[in-house]
Image (cartoon, helix red, strand yellow):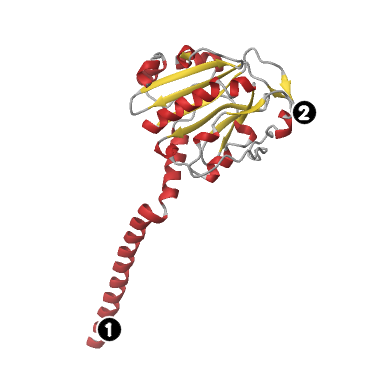
Amino acid sequence: MAGKKRSSRRWTRLIGGLLGLGIVWGFYVSRTSDKEIGAASLHEAKRLFEYTELLPSGEGEIVRHTYYTLSFNSRHKQANWVYYILGSEGKERVAERTDRFREDKKVPSGSAKPSDYTKSGYDRGHLCPAADMTHSAEAMEETFLMSNISPQLPVFNRGIWKSLEKQVRDWGEKERIYIVTGPVFKDNKGKIGRTGVTVPGFFYKVVYAPGARQMIAFVLPNTQEKRQLRDYAVTVDSVERLTNIDFFPQLSDTLENRLEAAVNYDSWR
């Protein structure tokens, strides 16, 4: 009996030791994963959580990509809104612009095709800018999906819209910001392509800085504009009325009402 007890104790100690090593190894791996192996995965998980946490509400087909989420309008064949986040990763310059425009196979009703824009007189205008996604080749590729594209006049796309994108990018390099952007289907300019892509009359961009607790929005006509960006700054409330989209509905009513009713361009500079 004594021999059996000693043998049993040895097995108990051995199993206990192995379990202990397993716990230590698991702790080591988890620490290593956090710091080295899985940093990117953890980063993406956090980003995806934030996407879900602060998505706008409204109509449309919700399509989730790794670096942005959108609501697709099957009638107008483009997004109602595209939601993405900018932070310090925006400073990284890893990926080059590809210009590989392609259909978005994730859109249930079918996205526009690159050929819809050919010889239309309109640029394939990005909603989530390619220049905001240079930190990853995958992120860059995603910006060229046609669900992220709207018809923009060349003078608009390469002019004041580009200036607004750069301004928002500069803000994102200073603090983490949340952006919702898209077309305003008012005073539209007809349709292009066999798919029937609506040419919007206006475009908007809404920016939220949770750290500074402030919001700002812009509405710009899809035309050649020579005024300053500050002249197009508006309240978020006014964009909600134009688009029937509720931005950042997850915020408390008190905070949302205060931030969405204010516009102070100078406080963002």
Residue 246 located left or right of residue 268: right
Res 247 seen here: no
Circle 1: residue type = Ser
Between disc 2 and disc 1, whose residue precedes?
A: 1
Instruction: Name the residue carrying label 1.
Output: 7
> Looking at the rendering, in which quadrant would you find the C terminus?
top left
Residue 245 to residue 42: above or below: above
**Residue 121 placement: quadrant:** top right
State how many labels appear.
2
Q: Residue at x 61, y 37 (%)?
A: 144
Badge 1 density bin: few <14, some 14–19, many ≥20, Cα 10 Å: few
Q: Where is residue 31 in the image (x, y as percent from the top left)?
A: 33, 56
Residue 210 located left or right of residue 222: left
Give the camera-side residue of 100 and 177.
100
Circle 2: residue type = Arg
Give the secondary structure at mark 2. Answer: loop
Residue 228 to residue 80: above or below: above
Residue 263 to residue 123: above or below: above
Give the secondary structure at mark 1. Answer: helix
Instruction: Name the residue carrying label 2.
Output: 194
Foreground mark, 2 or 1?
2
